[in-house]
Amino acid sequence: MIRQMPRAEPCAMTTKEIHDLGEGMYLRELTSGPRPVLLSTCLVAPDLRLLVLAPHPDDFDEIGVTMRFFQSNGNPIFVAVLSSGASGVEDSFSASSSSDTKAQLREQEQRESCRFFGLPDSHLTFLRLTEDSEGHIAEDSGNCEEIRSFIHRIRPAIVFLPHGNDTNTDHQRVYALFVRVATEALFPFVSLLNRDPKTISMRHDLIAPFGSAEAEWKASLLRLHKSQQQRNLNTRGVGFDERILEMNRQIARECDSDQEFAEAFEFVSWE
């Protein structure tokens, strides 16, 4: 049984049909009726822009199968990596213990994975938001304005980011900053909050099931984050690739999917 999380304002999902976000875009399946909805049944106009707000390098890759679906659909995808991710690199893996060297290493890993995915280099941006003394994204007005400016420049129809009900500090703070921006946005859009291994609980409104062939492709994508693959092997005894795919197996089991794996999202409308 999937645990349900009560939705707090301002994240209330409308019960009426979503008003038009662009000709040919339909997400009515997510506003009424049984859930979860299969991604393959949603119709989205190929000219609508998608934005991934990735707190860390590699958060885009966690939802790689879903992004691949939209890539095949023709949607322009933009990725904003918000933190340096330097604190996630072990000293033994880096040529230097400096935060800047580690940040450059993680950014290069993200560039390589996005090229493997097929994302244009110009669609990947590293914002490097201000961080606190512990290396976490600061929840301050400056970072809020950086996110606001980027969203208003891209004007996406759908924004993807990790769920805020999560033990990861950066996931919590990015979600909080995003909510501040979304409630003040001058144009309508929707967000899809993805499940992460550290997500405490969330509603499964939308799932993207996939089989072994796509799992092998996703594992290759995840392994390009070599620093995270090694860190997970050292600290958890399993690689980054297997850690994420095991979560995808669990989602598929919880949702009674006929596929072995699935990515999961909670839907939020911002009008």
Image (cartoon, rainbow, N blue to C red):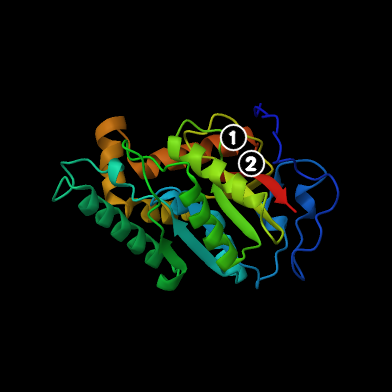
Is residue 212 visible in this depiction of the protein? no
| Residue 235 seen in this snapshot | yes
Q: Is residue 98 left or right of residue 200?
A: left
Mark 2 burial class by Cα count in 10 Å: few <14, some 14-19, many 20+:
some
Q: Residue at x 43, y 52 (%)?
A: 82
**Where in the figure is residue 38, as x and y percent of width and height?**
69, 50
Say few, some or many: other residues with alpha carbon within 10 Å of mark 1 (under 14 / 14 to 19 / 20 or more). some
Q: Residue at x 38, y 48 (%)?
A: 130
The image shows residue 124, relative to residue 190, as above or below, that is below
- Which residue is the site of mark 2? 257
Name above or below for residue 53 compared with residue 249: below
Residue 135 horizontal/vertical position (percent): 33, 40
Residue 262 in percent (x, y) is at 57, 45
Left or right of 44, for residue 154: left
Name the element at disc 1.
Answer: helix
Mark 1: which amino acid? Arg
Identify the residue at the far right of this view.
Answer: 16
Which residue in the protein does label 1 denote? 253
Q: CA distance from mark 1 to mark 2?
A: 6 Å
Say if mark 1 contacts mark 2, CB within 8 Å: yes
Q: Quadrant of residue 10?
A: top right
Q: Nearer the viewer, residue 132 or 259?
A: 132
Residue type beneath disc 2: Ser
